[in-house]
Image (tube, grey):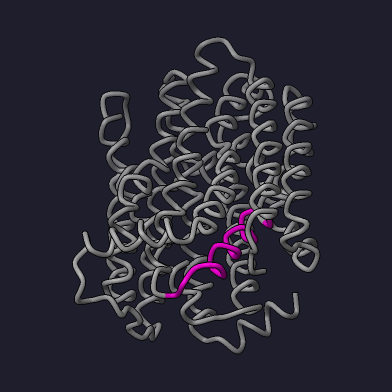
């Protein structure tokens, strides 16, 4: 933990970016729990829950071919301030969704809100390798994943109780307010204009990226390896668990908050414990450990309390798997392509996440047990481990 604090003390821009992350991510979980609680209270079908979960990722998929080029073309600070503003407005407007007839508005707002969030994330992740190199970049990615996990843990736990006591609309309002704080703090960050491609048009930049991936297939393979982490998009599965198994035990909002926060305990602990252990040779083992953890969760998920315990194990390996596979992409990509490669990488990752979310609802609709869906997701990580092993044998990967 000391090396993380030292890096934050030495890197002023990273420190402020991290504080903005903490505030905005914490706020995001207020609306996340509130959205799924609202859907369950409205009595929607499993397919609708899965569709909303898919919308959380779909906007990032659609915009990725253009967002990467724009990130490499526009000034990062102006772009990221605008994206925070969009998140404020779209979050606040969720307050007006109060019945099933307003679901189309919910779909639009979730799509826009998460599109802006995804765009912001891509801009930030392409900014980091421009200001940090080597071990500092790896540590910065780990700090990002710890902040995400910590905000996820505390945000989900607090939000579940907050929604239970104060209501859904109050959660949306608090979330919007936290984004306002994030915007005000971000406005104080001094970020230099880093793009060197401003005179090129978007089509030309997109064509260059595709040619670069053809020239450097190793980068594309690493993007596909990272995309396997998208199979941990469990929002729809957790919501269906709360609706199908736990409704008689605890209130929906509390069940959602507890399940996500217990998993996030593992998400926070993972990189702290595994950070010094993980390297390109151990990544296969991490895929296998994740597979076993998800299978264990599937075995016990019918029991609320055992499910909470197993959720910790599921989260324990996820964050390090995500952050280290992301680091490999950054370290093996030429700097002038950072924005575009990160965007295409996020497109693949979010596509898998969207597919996982919708597949969960579709399989549940056609009679699959939720345990069976978990076992299927467990299998994907076995495949992911084998795929990375083959890639690591064929290409020389910079660690």
Q: Is residue 341 above or below residue 62?
A: below
Report whether 326 appears left or right of 98: right
Q: How many marks?
A: 0
Q: What residue appears at the point 74 percent right and 57 percent down from the top-left corner?
A: 270
Report whether 164 appears left or right of 135: left
Report whether 139 appears left or right of 190: right
Position in image of residue 188 (x %, y %): 38, 83
Magenta includes 303?
no
Q: Is residue 74 above or below residue 53?
A: below
Q: Is residue 300 above or below residue 214?
A: above
Task: Tell me where residue 88 sits by quadrant.
Answer: bottom left
Task: Tell me where residue 276 sits by quadrant.
Answer: bottom right
Q: Is the C terminus in the top left, top right, bottom left or bottom right quadrant?
A: bottom right
Position in image of residue 32 (x %, y %): 47, 44
Most common SS among magenta residues: helix
What range is drawn magenta here?
320-335
């Amino acid at each position: 933990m000391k090396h993380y604090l030292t890096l934050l003390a030495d890197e002023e821009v990273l420190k402020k970016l991290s504080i903005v992350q903490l505030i905005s991510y914490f706020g995001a979980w207020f609306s996340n729990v509130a959205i799924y609680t609202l859907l369950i209270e409205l009595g929607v079908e499993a397919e609708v829950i899965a569709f909303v979960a898919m919308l959380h990722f779909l906007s990032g998929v659609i915009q990725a071919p253009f967002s990467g080029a724009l990130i490499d073309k526009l000034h990062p600070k102006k772009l990221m301030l605008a994206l925070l503003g969009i998140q404020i407005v779209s979050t606040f407007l969720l307050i007006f969704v109060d019945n099933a007839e307003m679901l189309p508005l919910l779909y639009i707002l979730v799509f826009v809100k998460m599109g802006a969030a995804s765009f912001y994330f891509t801009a930030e992740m392409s900014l980091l390798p421009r200001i940090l190199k080597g071990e500092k970049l790896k540590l910065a990615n780990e700090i990002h994943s710890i902040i995400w996990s910590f905000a996820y843990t505390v945000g989900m736990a607090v939000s579940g109780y907050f929604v239970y006591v104060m209501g859904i609309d109050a959660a949306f309002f608090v979330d919007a307010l936290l984004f306002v704080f994030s915007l005000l703090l971000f406005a104080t960050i001094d970020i230099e204009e880093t793009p060197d491609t401003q005179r090129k048009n978007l089509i030309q930049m997109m064509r260059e990226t595709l040619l670069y991936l053809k020239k450097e297939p190793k980068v594309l393979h690493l993007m596909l390896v990272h995309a396997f982490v998208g199979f941990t998009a469990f929002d729809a599965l957790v919501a269906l668990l709360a609706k199908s198994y736990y409704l008689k035990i605890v209130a929906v909002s509390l069940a959602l908050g507890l399940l996500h926060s217990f998993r996030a305990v593992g998400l926070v602990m993972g990189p702290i414990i595994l950070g010094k252990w993980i390297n390109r040779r151990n990544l296969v083992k991490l895929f296998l450990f994740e597979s076993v953890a998800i299978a264990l969760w599937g075995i016990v998920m019918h029991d609320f309390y055992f499910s909470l315990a197993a959720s910790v194990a599921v989260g324990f390996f996820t964050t390090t798997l995500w952050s280290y596979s992301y680091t490999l992409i950054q370290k093996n990509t030429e700097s002038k392509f950072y924005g575009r490669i990160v965007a295409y990488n996020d497109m693949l990752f979010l596509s898998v996440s969207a597919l996982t979310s919708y597949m969960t609802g579709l399989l549940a609709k056609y009679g699959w047990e939720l345990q069976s869906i978990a076992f299927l997701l467990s299998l994907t990580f076995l495949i992911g481990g084998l795929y990375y092993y083959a890639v690591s044998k064929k290409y020389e990967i910079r660690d």
